[in-house]
Image (cartoon, helix red, strand yellow):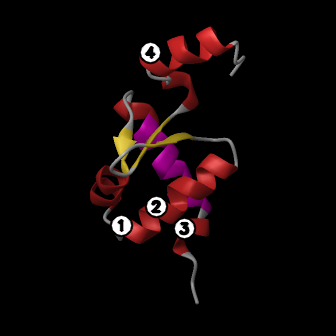
């Protein structure tokens, strides 16, 4: 079985997409922009999160992801309040 989400080119394209967005994006957004299946996009984004290349947050509805350098201001303030250095 071919694991397309392990493709280095696809990972780099995904990171570029997140950096260009500059705001948190959904799995569906990434799937639509990269023309891949929703499940493939989810697996790819979760793997990049585990590798520390992408930040992710489980919301009430689904997940959102963003490039670490574009941390949403609400999360940045919450982390400062908790004393989290990330």
> What secondary structure is found at the residue carrying circle 1?
helix
Q: Are marks 3 and 4 in contact (CB under 8 Å)?
A: no
Q: How far is mark 3 from mark 1, CA to CA? A: 11 Å
> What secondary structure is found at the residue carrying circle 3?
helix
Q: Residue at x 34, y 60 (%)?
A: 31
Closer to viewer: mark 3 or mark 4: 4
Few, some or many residues within 10 Å of mark 3 (<14, 14–19, 20+): some
| Picture disc at residue 42 | 2
Q: How far is mark 3 from mark 4, CA to CA? A: 29 Å
Q: How far is mark 2 from mark 3, CA to CA? A: 9 Å
Q: Residue furthest bottom?
A: 1
Residue 47 x %, y %: 61, 57
Q: How far is mark 2 from mark 4, CA to CA? A: 24 Å
The image quarter in which residue 5 lies: bottom right
Magenta-highlighted residues:
8-18
Q: Which residue is mark 4?
A: 73
Residue 42 x %, y %: 46, 61
Q: Which residue is mark 3?
A: 5
Q: Residue at x 60, y 17 (%)?
A: 79
Residue 86 x %, y %: 68, 22
Along the line of sight, the residue nearer the viewer: 60 or 56: 60
> What secondary structure is found at the residue carrying circle 2?
helix
| Picture disc at residue 80 | none
Q: Which is more N-terminal, label 3 or label 2?
A: 3
Q: Which residue is mark 1?
A: 38
Is residue 1 inside the magenta stretch? no
Closer to viewer: mark 3 or mark 1: 1
Q: Are marks 1 and 2 in contact (CB under 8 Å)?
A: yes
Q: Which is more N-terminal, label 4 or label 2?
A: 2
Q: Which is more N-terminal, label 1 or label 3?
A: 3
């Amino acid at each position: 079985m071919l694991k397309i989400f392990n493709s280095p080119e696809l990972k780099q394209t995904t990171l570029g997409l997140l950096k260009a967005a500059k705001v948190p994006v959904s799995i569906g957004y990434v799937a639509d922009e990269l023309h891949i299946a929703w499940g493939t996009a989810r697996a790819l984004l979760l793997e990049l999160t585990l590798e520390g290349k992408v930040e992710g947050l489980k919301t009430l509805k689904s997940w959102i992801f963003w490039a670490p350098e574009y941390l949403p201001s609400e999360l940045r303030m919450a982390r400062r309040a908790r004393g989290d250095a990330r």
